[in-house]
Every structure is written in C-alpha cells, then in structure tokens.
Amino acid sequence: MTGPYILQPDPSDPALSTEVPGIDQTGAPVMTKVVTEKPLTLYLNSQEVVTMMTIGDHPDLLAVGYLKNQNMLSDTDVITGIDYDDDLEVVVVRTEQETNFEDKMKKKVRTSGCAQGTVFGDVMEGFDRIDLPANAKIKTSWLYHLAKTINMTPSLYLEAGAIHGCVLCQEDKPLVYMEDVGRHNAVDKIAGWMMLNKIPAGDKIFYTTGRLTSEMVIKTVMMGIPVLVSRSGFTAWGVELAQKAGLTLIGRARGKRFVALAGNERIEFDMNPDLAGDEPENARRKGSMAAE
Amino acid sequence: MTGPYILQPDPSDPALSTEVPGIDQTGAPVMTKVVTEKPLTLYLNSQEVVTMMTIGDHPDLLAVGYLKNQNMLSDTDVITGIDYDDDLEVVVVRTEQETNFEDKMKKKVRTSGCAQGTVFGDVMEGFDRIDLPANAKIKTSWLYHLAKTINMTPSLYLEAGAIHGCVLCQEDKPLVYMEDVGRHNAVDKIAGWMMLNKIPAGDKIFYTTGRLTSEMVIKTVMMGIPVLVSRSGFTAWGVELAQKAGLTLIGRARGKRFVALAGNERIEFDMNPDLAGDEPENARRKGSMAAE
C-alpha cells in the first residue's frame, strides 16, 4: 500500500545516498547510509539567481518551483526551456521575455539570511490577494489514511533519515511525494511539478513532515492549496498567517491524534479516531526525526 | 538535574510562546502552546544586512553571532555598541571601523536561497584555514551524561515543540543552551555569546538537535569547536566536510546508541553503553520532533 503515486521517492537511486564507514557506541565499525547534499546553481535566463543545497533529483522541478514560489515566475511567463548540466551543477530556466529580475533581487537580499530564505516583501503582496476555496474539505478518514500510506511509502527518510518530505494529496490519495535535504526544496519541487503540469490546487491537500512555520504557510497559500497538514508542530506566526488566509492548518498529526489551529470549518469528522490506531512502527524513521 | 548552565531556556517567558485555541481529532476544543516567530532586522553600522525569523530572545547575541558566522565580523573588529529596538524589531551592531560590507553582500546573494542560508564562497575560505585541536577528546560517559541532562532540561521544545536547540558543552557539563525557530539562529546566538565573552572553543563540545548538514559542520568548524554531536542524522557533504576539517562528528545519539562518521580518534570509550540506558521518556518532545 504505497499509494497511487504519480511521483514518489526512489530510495534505491545510488545518486541520492552514500554508504559511509563509521563506528558505533561500542567502537565497532558500521556502514551508515547518508543522504546526498550538493549545490545546484539556478539561472533565470542569463541571470544567476541562487545556489541551493539539494539532494539533486528533479532539478527542473526544483528550478521552476523555486522561481514560482519566489514570485520570479508568474503563470503568464512562458517557459521556453529548462537546461540542466549535472557536471556544472547548474540549471537554467529560459522564458520568452526577460523578467524584472533586479527588483526581485533587491527584495531578496533583505531576507536572504532568514532561516526560511523567503523573498518576504515580495511574497506577502501576493499572499493577501489569494482566495482559498471555502468549499474545499478534509475528512478525518482521508487524513488517517494519508498518514498511514505516506508513512509506509519507501523513502530516503526511512532509509537514511535527515531529509524532509512533502506530499501533494487529493482526498485520501497521495499524488506526488518529494524529499530533499532542504525543506523548501521539497515544497518547491512540488510547486514546479504543479506549474509545469497545470495542476489545479483548490482540491488538493498538502502534507509535510516539516514544521508549520510562517514560510510553510505562505508557500501553501501562494500555491493555492486550502489544507496544510503536518506531523510536526506550529509557530505562532504560522498560525496567525493561516487564520488570516483562511488556510486549514492541521499539525501534530500522529497516529490518531492531531490539532487544528486554523480553518477548522473544512474538517469533516467522519471517522472514529480510535479506529485510526497508533503510529505505525515504521513511521519512526531511521536515525533522524529531522524531517518532522 | 538541569545542569550547571550559564544560560538556558526560559520556557516560562510569555514573550516566547502563545496559547492558541484549536480543536483536536475529536473536534473538542484544545489550547495549544506555540512558539513565537517574528522578524528581526539586523544592521551592521548604517547598513541593513538581513531580516531573520527568530523567537526573539537574545537579539544581541544573535546579531553578533550571525555577523561572526557570516565572516562579516572578525575577532579584530571592535564592537562599540549593540542597540536593540523591540518595537521596530531592529538590532544594530556598531563597530569602530566600517567593514567591507558590499563584497560580502555580493557573495551573500549567491546562496541566499539555499536552505541553509550561508554565505558560502566566503565562509569556505576561512574553513580551510582552521586547525581543530587534535588533543581534544570526547568521552562516551560525557556524551551519555550530556544527552540525559539536556533532554531533561526544561525547554520550549518540551513545552511547545517546533523549535531547534543547540548546547555549548565542556566535558560532561552543558554551559549555554539556546533555542530558536531557526536552527542557524540557535547556533549564531551561541557564537555571539562566545565572541562577546571571549570563550575559548578548543575544549568545547557542540550539541545540536538538528541535522548534521554541511552548514552545521561549517559553522562548528568556523567556531573552532572540535566535536559536534546530534540526536539527528547526517548528510553526505556534512560528513565529507567534517572529515576534511578533522571535526569529530557524532550523530543519531539516542539513549545508548550513536554513530561517529568523522574524527573518531577523539572518542574515548570509557563507559559501557548498556549502563547509559534508553531514551528518557521526556526526551520525546511534545507535538513536534522538528528540532531533531
């Protein structure tokens, strides 16, 4: 039961992890699987934008999603090509017209050191204009089924830990499951996939293993997705922004338990939590809870 | 037994968390404690540097530590003042001479979108020059005692989850325990404390709840600390950099278990792991494992 995924992790891909020799608490030699982390430099046309630390899969989706979530690409921009050079660790997104890049960069610098790394001034403009569909809903039966399915999906997280995961879902079906050493990268890859495939967002549910911070909420709202779910906890500003945007914010979703702090009216309690059971054993990931 | 801390979290500080009304999986109303997350804009003299998302405690330490870890401040720079304005959410660090800021900013843009948000080109120059003391050591008895003490220390993590923690330690004693919504902020606050108090680094141990990524390794090495320990997992580049710098890198440290992937020669196995026992109950944090 790994779900009807359109895209899901491939933990067997040798490019995404390495076996490293080490020692354990007794001094005995052990081989430890660790996830890949390498730089990827993104260009928008001739302009260098940023260098990201990424696990390296789906550079095209990451590039487009990053530009989209940073408001450097709009749905009206026509992408004429995405070139990726593995050796140079460079990805170039080409558009029909040049974009007003310099303005964006000025704003970017303002928050570049922020732990969340979002182009804030810029993103917030868009944020206030977004209307999330009021009629969208999330049934608790979907929630429980999604959590179980996602937790049992083979992933680098289960194999090596120390990686974040995000899943785009519809009703009780996970559609696209992305992982990355950078939490934003996992989100951006999904945003890139949605943009390139013109996927409607209003009927989707966004599941993340990461915390429900302001940036996570902003990105979900910017993507037009009305429901955000996490195994993990909340920050105060994340909650405040979710309430402002009318985003349904569900956190601490583990086994039968969860807490909703915004957009509660979309939740349909159609299942007895006791039937959801507790956290499946292998939801406790190997080595690291980093992605939760 | 909360350890002989010089500085430690104050989960009772009302400024650092808020109670938010929500509903649980049964639809019943619940009050949930969530951590504060607010912007802090940092100036170096007259120049705006960055806006960080932070929990908001110790803005002076965060400011100095950020500039230090970004190589914008060196030990030769004389800090003449640190002004913090709570209402404006601004902190200004003043130095005797102006620093060569523009160069730094150019480099900064290059990696501003990186999940880790480090000024890479710049930091790496310093990285290669650092010599970590070979004679420093870490006894497994210290390791087990530190983990227990830190796990039982009252913290926002235990109270509200969704926050990262870092602890500067010496032998089996935790000295300074910082938490923040941004993992880098927690590290930077400790770096700021060390710089302002001229604390030697060669005999210290750095404990983090976060993952052992390239940036975590780089920051620890730049701070001159020879041993980095985490409950969490590794990335491949983090391991590679630790090996290159001769940093002792210990991860997945939970209960009696741990794995070392670099600098193993500093580890002294002076305690039977079975006596270390398993993870203390309250090491399993409330709501979120986000900081691990």
Image (cartoon, coloured by chain):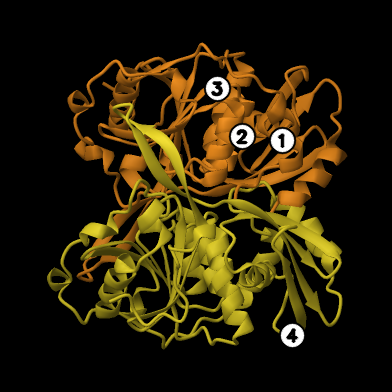
Chain colours: A yellow, B orange
Q: Compared to B254, does A174 lie above or below?
A: below
Q: CA distance from mark 1 to mark 2?
A: 8 Å
Q: N-terminal of the two: label 1 or label 2?
A: 1
Q: CA distance from mark 2 to mark 3?
A: 10 Å
Q: CA distance from mark 4 to mark 3?
A: 50 Å
Question: Which residue occupies the foreground of this view, A9 or B118?
Answer: A9
Q: CA distance from mark 2 to mark 4?
A: 40 Å
Residue lying farthest to the left in this orientation: A274
Chain at tag 3:
B
Residue B218, which numbered label? 2
Kindly identify which residue carries mark 3.
B225
Q: Would you call the spot at circle 3 few (<14 residues within 10 Å), some (14-19), or many (20 or more)? A: many
Q: Would you call the spot at circle 2 few (<14 residues within 10 Å), some (14-19), or many (20 or more)? A: many
Q: Amino acid at mark 4?
A: Thr
Q: Amino acid at mark 1?
A: Met
Tags 2 and 4 on a common chain: no
Tags 1 and 2 on a common chain: yes
Please report the residue visible at 40 percent of the width from the left and 57 percent of the height from the top.
A157
Question: Which residue occupies the foreground of this view, A175 or A160?
Answer: A160
Q: Secondary structure at mark 1?
A: helix
Chain at tag 1:
B
Q: Are marks 4 and 3 in contact (CB under 8 Å)?
A: no
Residue A182: quarter of image: bottom right
Chain at tag 4:
A
Kindly identify which residue carries mark 4.
A76
Quadrant in which the C terminus of chain A is drawn: bottom left
Kindly identify which residue carries mark 1.
B124
